[in-house]
Image (spheres, helix red, strand yellow):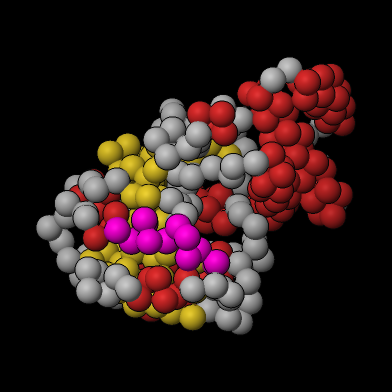
Amino acid sequence: MLFSVVIPAHNAESEIGAQLEALAGQLCEESFEVIVVDNRSTDATSDVAREFTHKLRLRVVSATERAGAAYARNMGIEHASGRYVVFVDADDVVHANLLAAYREQVESFRILGGAYDERTINDPRVAAWRYELSARGLPVAFEKIPFFLMGNAAIDRTVFDEIGPFDERLTHGGEEVDFSVRAALAGIEIGWVPEAIVYYRHRTDLRGLSKQFYEYGRATALVFAEHRETAGLRATTKREAVGVAVDVVAHAVNLARGNRRRGEWVRIASFRAGQVVQSAKQRVLYL
């Protein structure tokens, strides 16, 4: 089997059906399996997933030891039979050509990263709060390291044997950046596959946006501290940090300047706050 599709899921009963329906409609001639990893759901996520066993080669795995998507994905890897493990999320929707697009590149790269379509399934008012993660190709961390998007990637199983699993300490994001840094240090290149598309679903309110980006900020600072020396990453100077703080405060007026600017400010301020909190804990400055 070429592909094992791993979907970590927590209380996703209202959304996972759309994702599984999209996987059932894949235009890929290769056989593949789907592994839904139910991570401590208290709703009917597992029951909804099992309804698709007549459409997909599908298994539901229970992951109850701890909470966290990295842990759930690692559990999925352990149960996977495919040569490549494809990672997608329960609340997104894959394009019908996703696996076929990855199939075209599996002989060229051991790690493949696809694109996010951030407009199709999102309200334009919500989409306006954010920047498009893959508009220019693979995003870049720390100004030097390309990384794949965790909700749309395909990884050869031998890579996990070589550099290890996802870091389960990263319970709120950042595991793809950490993994990509480790891959870069091992000399493993990430291939960009723009034809492999996932329709990415945004948070629909400012509270959810703020919480998400606060955790992203914390994760970024944590990964920076972990790899600062081995990857030669540059810390933020005190002067630069003051500039960041002044910029955030100065633009707080955007809270009263309409939907787009309000959302943008909440996103940026929350991310910076997360970086500050985690930088203090790690005793290293990265903004």
Residue 6 is drawn in which quadrant?
Answer: bottom left
Query: Is residue 281 visible to the viewer in this orientation of the structure?
Result: yes
Q: Is residue 233 above or below residue 69?
A: above
Q: Is residue 246 above or below residue 106?
A: above
**Residue 176 appears at what percent x and percent y?**
52, 53
Image quarter of residue 241: top right
**Residue 17 sits above or below residue 104 on the image:** below
Please identify the quadrant where the N terminus is shown.
bottom left
Image quadrant in which the C terminus is located: top right
Q: Is residue 37 visible?
A: no
Q: Residue furthest left?
A: 29
Expressed as whole percent of the image width and height from the top left, the position of residue 236 reads: 77, 34
Residue 100's x, y, as percent?
A: 20, 50
Query: Is 244 on the left-hand or right-hand side of 125?
Result: right
On screen, residue 83 versus residue 151, left or right, reads: left
Magenta highlight on residue 41: no
